[in-house]
Structures are given as structure tokens and as C-alpha cells.
Amino acid sequence: MKNVNTLFKTKYPVIQGGMANIATAELASAVSNAGGLGLIGAGGYDANWVRTEIRKCKELTDQPFGVNIMLMSPHAPEIAKVVVEEGVKVVTTGAGSPGIYMESWKKAGIVVVPVVPSVALAIRMERQGADAVVAEGTESGGHIGESTTMALIPQMADALSIPVIAAGGIADKRGVLAAFALGAKGVQIGTVLLATKECPVHENYKQKVVKAKDTDTVVTGRGTGAPVRVLKNKMAIEYLNMSTAGVPLVELEKLTLGSLRRAVFDGDLDRGSFMAGQISGLVKEVKTVKEVLQALFDGVNEYKENLEVM
Ligand code: TUI
């Protein structure tokens, strides 16, 4: 099985989450320059925005980087062409199955890594030609599945012969080691990167992650087929109360329309959607991206040697 550092040409076996509205060329290049695989998150942006960010990223780093395509976006088909035209080396996908794009991406020599929340989907992705998968546990921020990282990783590792990259709940060396112990060959991180100097979110977003404790996330939209984990605030609580009271979906959608942008750009603490994972409680300070990656990996083998089970 191919080593993840060989697959991505990285120093550290880590990729950045494709965080919509957050993962710009600025963040992606910082992650790539620090030795991980940075990703531009296409989110709901159009193909021109993605092309511009790819070109910016090429200016900001000479290291490999990728693009994350959020498949629920109406712009996904066009973005799928742009990554080929721009010679992007790695594509990760989320919120759907990338099957229809696989052939064109493989023909272009792109390393394809779907993000999936279940073993069945992962098996489908391997059959369709995926080079690796990100197994995303329900601890993650944003749009999530049901299984925990702890349960998902070993089951996926047993079911696949391509590398499994673990996501959800990883923010320090212990998380990295746990993921590898469960059978992962790499990790994806998102939440811990929100609290970095290079992350282009409003300062309020960073501070909300830093101040969060273990129980401070909730999942909205469980009834809609697109559950989303966010940090608790007035809007999230209101959403859950309305949802319990049986308020129709269209009304709930009005409440959350544009809410991710309100969090990311305006730092609107009451009415923003602060997508973040359960590991927020472990994130205590704003660091540089380089410091985050070093904290995850430097000395990890020595740390492993000191683990004593019995
Ligand atoms: O995609 C994510 N995380 C995201 S996307 C996002 S933008 C958004 N905002 C509001 C509502 C919905 C999306 C914010 N965070 N992670 C990867 C991920 N993929 N999680 C779950 C899935 C997934 C779900 C269903 C992948 C495949 C899938 O397939 C269904 C099918 O059968 O095709």
C-alpha cells in the first residue's frame, strides 16, 4: 500500500479539511508550506473563484496542494473541469459521490480522495478508482455522518486496500497515534486549523473555537438529510427548538440562509453558523499552521514508545 507522504509528496501525512468559505489559497498554501497537503475548499463558490484561488495558491507555494469539491454545489460539474485544466494534483470530495468525474480525473493523473462517512460508500469509492479515502467521523465539524472516528477507522481499514485517512476528533499527537493505531495511514484536520494565524476567518470564529469546551457543539439538520455540526449559539439553539416544535423545513432554512458567511466574514456570534468539531474543547490557543503541524508530528514516534498498555 502506498504511503500517504509518497501519494501526496508531503513531509507530514496530513491533509487539511476542505472547509467551505474558509479554505482559501491563503490557508491552503500555509498548510502546504508547513509540510502538509493544503486544500482549496470550493464550497459553494463558482468555477471562476476556484480557478483564481488555484492560481493564487501556485504563487504562494511551490509545494503540492489540492482542491476539495463540495458535491452538493451546483457549480461542482464546472469545477470538476477546472481542476483538470489547471493541473491540480489532488482532489478531495465531500457531501456526495464523485463517481461521474472519476474517469476524467484519473485520466488527468489526479490523485482522487473522496471524503466518506461509511464503509459502504468507501468500498464503492475504491471500486471506482479512488486512490485513498478520508474516513470522516461524526466528531467532525460541518456536514457529517453517524459513525464515530473510533468505530469507523478500523472497519474501513479492514474493508479496503487503499489508504484510509482519519478525520474527526484529531488535534494533537494522541489523536494522530490513535488514528494510526486504528489502521489509518494519515489524518485530516480542520477544527485545529481554524485557530491559526493564517486561517482567514473572523477573529470571533477563532476565539469561539478556543473558548469552546467538550460539550459545546450541537448537530442541526438531523431531519433534513444533511446534518451539520456547529458550535452552540443563539441561532443553533433556536434552530433545534424550532425543529423539535415541528416548524417546516423551509422556515428552518430561512434561519440558516447565509449563516456560514455570517460566521466566517462578520464574526456574527448570535446568527452565524460556526462549523467546528467536538475537538474544539482541546484547542486552547491560536498558533501558526507550522506550529500546529509540528505539535502533531514532531516527536510522535518517541511519544508512541512511551505508551504502555500493560
Ligand atoms: O462534506 C463534508 N463536510 C461539509 S460540506 C459543508 S457545506 C454544507 N453546508 C450545509 C449543508 C451541507 C453542506 C460543510 N461541511 N464532509 C465530508 C462528508 N461527506 N461528510 C458526509 C459526506 C457524504 C455524505 C453522503 C459523502 C457521501 C455521501 O454520499 C451519498 C451518496 O450516496 O451519494
Image: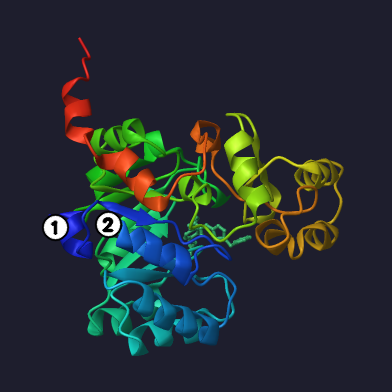
* Mark 2 lies on residue: 35
Q: Which structural element holds mark 2?
A: loop
Q: Residue at x 45, y 71 (%)?
A: 25
Q: How many badges with numbers are in the image? A: 2
The numbered mark at residue 72 is: none
Say if residue 196 shows up in the picture.
Answer: yes
Give amino acid for label 1: Lys
In this picture, is 287 found above or below 116? above
In this picture, is 109 found above or below 184? below
Quadrant that contains the C terminus: top left
Q: Residue at x 30, y 32 (%)?
A: 178
* Mark 1 lies on residue: 2
Crowding at mark 2 (Cα within 10 Å: few <14, some 14-19, many 20+): many
In this picture, is 84 found above or below 218? below
Is 265 displayed left or right of 191 in the figure? right
Farthest-out residue, top: 310
Q: Earlier in the sequence, mark 1 or mark 2?
A: 1
Q: Residue at x 32, y 40 (%)?
A: 296
